[in-house]
Image (tube, coloured by chain):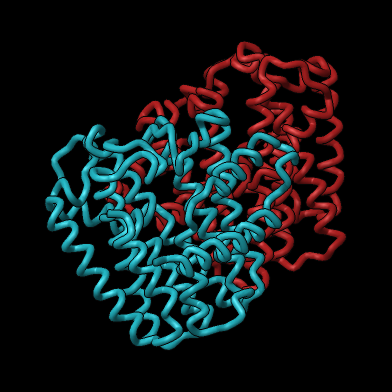
Chain colours: A red, B cyan
Amino acid sequence: MYKALKKDLKKIRESVNIRVDRFLPRKDEYPKNIHKAIRHSLFAGGKGIRSYMLIKIYSIFCEDVEPIMPLAVAFEMLHTYTLIHDDLPYLDNDDFRRGKPTCHKLFGEDVALLGGDTLLIYAFDIISQMEVADKVKAEILQKFSAMAGARGLIGGQWEDVNCEGKTVDKQKLAYIHSKKTAEFIKLTATLACLLAEASEEDTELLEEYAGNIGLGFQIVDDILDIEGTFQERGKSIGKDLESKKITYPALYGLQESKDEVEKLMMRAKEILDKFHDKGLMLQRFTDYIYLSKW
Amino acid sequence: MYKALKKDLKKIRESVNIRVDRFLPRKDEYPKNIHKAIRHSLFAGGKGIRSYMLIKIYSIFCEDVEPIMPLAVAFEMLHTYTLIHDDLPYLDNDDFRRGKPTCHKLFGEDVALLGGDTLLIYAFDIISQMEVADKVKAEILQKFSAMAGARGLIGGQWEDVNCEGKTVDKQKLAYIHSKKTAEFIKLTATLACLLAEASEEDTELLEEYAGNIGLGFQIVDDILDIEGTFQERGKSIGKDLESKKITYPALYGLQESKDEVEKLMMRAKEILDKFHDKGLMLQRFTDYIYLSKW
């Protein structure tokens, strides 16, 4: 069912990877271990959902995706930095990620710490080198750093770790999901539309679309931690329950979680309808995110 | 002897701290621990050498230092992020810094990890908000991230940790000192001159000056680890020897280290002479860095 989509995901992932490869120092360049570790995590087989959405939303408006490619690389770098630091024993203490040993298991905690730092810096570095109007660049940087900082992603990471084993309410869960995943993914729409000079109306719609995907993706991830298998997920199963991490199903129950996912999906697809043919591949992508895994 | 200088250092440190305070979320803002930890480390009594040099070099050319203040904040944030991550048990495992418990000792390793990440992001954030020509901003960002990345600071940090207990040569030591300290401090001259629209000749001279201060400062630090006291240094003494860290005196001997410092100082002061009265306070500062401590 998802043959065309999977081909498209793969094609875009590969073309992003080529840019990543071109931007990064070679793996034998000094300091070797850091560069090896970064490459390991960046090329560990992630689907590249953030860069895919960024590029596909941009291409609703513009045929030539070249101008947005550096930003796609920055999104993958920022995402990978959060994974590397999250997996460290100080935070989630995860041994597997995408079916492979995590960065610190392979390269040591010192390398993983500095490797994550490096990716964070590289993400800003590649944005600062983009060939776009300087004013647009400054706006991208501001939105990107606001999303990544303590009022954004890091706030979500912190609460996620901090709430383990505690009783938390729905408001706190919404905060974590929003900061850790949904706003990150929503920013793909904001910045794709900014670069594509999309109308305010289209920008708002696509931000809502991306926000729905972000939240839905997080809930699906929580559900799969209960219903999935190691093989499907590439990481340890039941770990959320074991570590008493709060999840959507834990607070709302499995059925309500699935209903919520369906609601988000319906609205996401309704938005895409407005873009007709231009949104076709994103329609498939939306189905895939929401339905293909259980 | 250094009364006027100390007053000036204090005045500038305070005015930078006011900007830091204004930029940061309040310490009771969510996520509280992260913001408390960041404030602890930023206000832990560091001399603020980087921001001082940036501002003083800039004011050789421009009276109003307002335009460079956000960059001064960014330098202190980047510097503090490296200290927080360096002190973590994964790297140097230090319990004291500037006479106070290190960030992770007070707030936990998880907070210190995310707090360091936050400061790194904030450094880019505040630069991206600077009120300078967008072209200049892009250039600042590129130079700043190049210095901070794995080809710069992080490369130096990695080799510094990685070489503990190993036999290393003078070339490796020069690499570490250059990447970890000297190039960082040299960048204060590069960017101060860029913002002040200084001539190419003046920029090169002041870069040499700042590079000398950076290297000299590092050698002095190594010497003080042998000859200093805990009270003078605010951190554990003899730690370099104990952890078999390579230092300048270990490779060159104490006397040759002191001679090298003197040579660097003479050249630094010779450069400042060319700026006459405008360089007076930096003359005092140079003496202070090199001579006041042994």
Percent across and percent down for residue A183 are 73, 44
Percent across and percent down for residue A60 are 73, 59
Q: Give the answer, above or below, for where A103 lies relative to A31.
A: above
Q: Is residue B204 left or right of residue A61?
A: left
Q: Give the answer, above or below, for where B146 lies relative to B159.
A: below
What residue is drawn where x is 67% and y is 28%? A160
Percent across and percent down for residue B217 are 32, 58
Res B111 seen here: yes
Q: Closest to the observer: B132 or A1?
A: B132
Q: Closest to the observer: B108 or A94?
A: B108
Q: Is residue A232 left or right of residue A268?
A: left
Farthest top residue in view: A242
Q: Closest to the observer: A276 or B211?
A: B211
Quarter holding the C terminus of chain B? Answer: bottom left
Q: Quadrant of residue B37?
A: top right
Percent across and percent down for residue B102 are 48, 36
